[in-house]
Image (cartoon, helix red, strand yellow):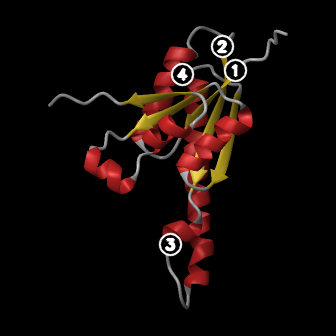
């Protein structure tokens, strides 16, 4: 039975230039052909939990968490607004947006499952082997764990 429903493409967004570049590249290459797009676009931002950012314990920690949470919410709102503006500038107006608290690796893979996405797009910081091993790589994790096609968009290196 054939359906006319569009496939879902999830794009992971955060407040780094690599993420913005990945969204820009995706809009230019998948959404430039006019109003009849092949995919339905879902932008997903993983908002860290206040406790994961603060990492404090003891007296006074409870007083800091609401302030940190407020800051994280403001950052998420800025990230979403910037991404929506970019989409609108490319005449892509039908965009779904989710802000989910948690680690980006899990949030993105869960969004793929929840929405039955056929593609996940993530940016790449271009970390080397050591940094990737220490910091962890969202794109590497998603490439191995997401149950869909994963496209890792790398920002071109600038020539000096």
- 4 vs 1, front mark: 1
Residue placed under numbered mark 2 in the picture: 38
Q: Distance between the residues labelled 2 and 1?
A: 7 Å
Q: How far apart are marks 2 and 3 (CA)?
A: 41 Å
Left/right of residue 131 with respect to residue 84 in the rendered view: left
Q: Which of marks 3 and 1 is nearer the N terminus?
A: 1
Q: Distance between the residues labelled 2 and 4?
A: 12 Å
Farthest left residue in view: 160
3 or 17, nearer to the observer: 3
Left/right of residue 8 with respect to residue 65 in the rendered view: right
Q: Which mark is residue 27?
A: 4
Q: Could you tell me if the residues under marks 3 and 1 are in contact, i.e. CB atoms within 8 Å?
A: no
Farthest bottom residue in view: 59
Image quadrant for the C terminus? top left
Q: Earlier in the sequence, mark 4 or mark 1?
A: 1
Picture coordinates of residue 155, whole percent (x, y): 35, 30
Picture coordinates of residue 149, whole percent (x, y): 55, 25
Q: Residue 7 carries which label?
A: 1
Left/right of residue 111 with respect to residue 86 in the rendered view: right
Q: How far apart are marks 3 and 4 (CA)?
A: 35 Å
Q: Is mark 3 on a helix, strand or loop?
A: helix
Mark 3: few/some/many CA within 10 Å (<14, 14-19, 20+): few
């Amino acid at each position: 039975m054939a359906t006319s429903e569009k496939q879902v493409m999830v794009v992971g967004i955060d407040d780094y230039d690599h993420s913005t570049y990945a969204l820009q590249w995706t809009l230019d290459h998948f959404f430039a052909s006019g109003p009849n797009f092949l995919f339905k676009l879902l932008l997903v931002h993983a908002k860290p939990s206040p406790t994961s950012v603060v990492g404090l314990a003891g007296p006074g920690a409870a007083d800091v968490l609401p302030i940190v949470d407020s800051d994280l919410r403001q950052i998420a709102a800025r990230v979403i607004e910037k991404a929506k503006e970019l989409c609108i500038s490319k005449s892509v107006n039908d965009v779904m947006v989710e802000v989910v608290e948690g680690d980006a690796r899990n949030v993105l893979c869960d969004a793929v499952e929840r929405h039955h996405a056929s593609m996940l797009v993530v940016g790449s910081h271009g970390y080397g082997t050591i940094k990737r091993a220490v910091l962890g790589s969202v794109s590497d994790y998603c490439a191995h764990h997401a149950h869909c096609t994963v496209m890792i968009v790398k920002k071109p290196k600038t020539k000096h």
